[in-house]
Image (tube, helix red, strand yellow):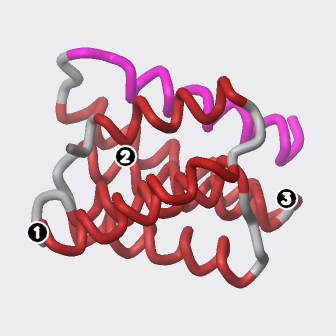
Amino acid sequence: MDHKSIAIQLFNETWVLIDQKNRTNDQDALMIHKAHASLYHWLQIGTVLHFQRGEWLISHVYSLLNLPESALYHAKRCLQITIENSIDDFDLTFAYEAMARAYKITNHELKNKYLSKAEDSLSQIKKMDDRLYAMSQLQDLK
């Protein structure tokens, strides 16, 4: 199996765990490991967009597990990659969403700042289905 296949498989397996209700502590740990491993394999053969999305996924996992320090570390990396590489559309909105989600527990003011940036960026998402999905995810942060 090659890096790309493994990265995709681990990304998808992470989403299965994200969607699973009532995960065990071992499943939570496995979700963290799979997200990190997916990014590791993308770092071997991917593009900056893969790196950005990998950082987003890791941040999302840590946010779900109420681990704000780790969530924020990876959200900041996601946003930095996004800005430095002029990544826009869906991925720009979700870079701001990652920051808002990471701050949700620790800093209400910064959560609202990044949530506002995410909402402001919605209009530049080209596909309406993507825009509607992003809007639904931002609703969860209100």
Q: What is the CA distance from the residue labelled 2 to the residue labelled 3?
A: 21 Å
In this rendering, which labeled residue sits more in front, label 3 or label 1? 1
| Discs 2, 3 touching: Cβ within 8 Å | no
- Relative height, residue 135 to residue 75 (above, below): above
Look at the image and tell me in which quarter the C terminus lies.
top left
Nearest to N terminus: mark 2 or mark 3: 3
Give the residue displayed 55% in from the left and 61% down from the top: 55
Q: What is the CA distance from the residue labelled 3 to the residue labelled 1?
A: 33 Å
Residue on which disc 3 sits: 46
Q: Residues within 10 Å of mark 2 (few under 14, many from 20)?
A: many
Viewed as shown, does residue 43 lie left or right of 69? right
Element marked by disc 2? helix
Q: What is the CA distance from the residue labelled 2 to the residue labelled 1?
A: 16 Å
Q: Give the image quarter of residue 125.
A: top right
Q: Is residue 4 magenta?
A: yes
Tell me the number on the disc at residue 75.
none
Residue on which disc 1 sits: 106
| Magenta-colored span | 1-21
Element marked by disc 1? loop
Nearest to N terminus: mark 3 or mark 1: 3
Element marked by disc 3? loop
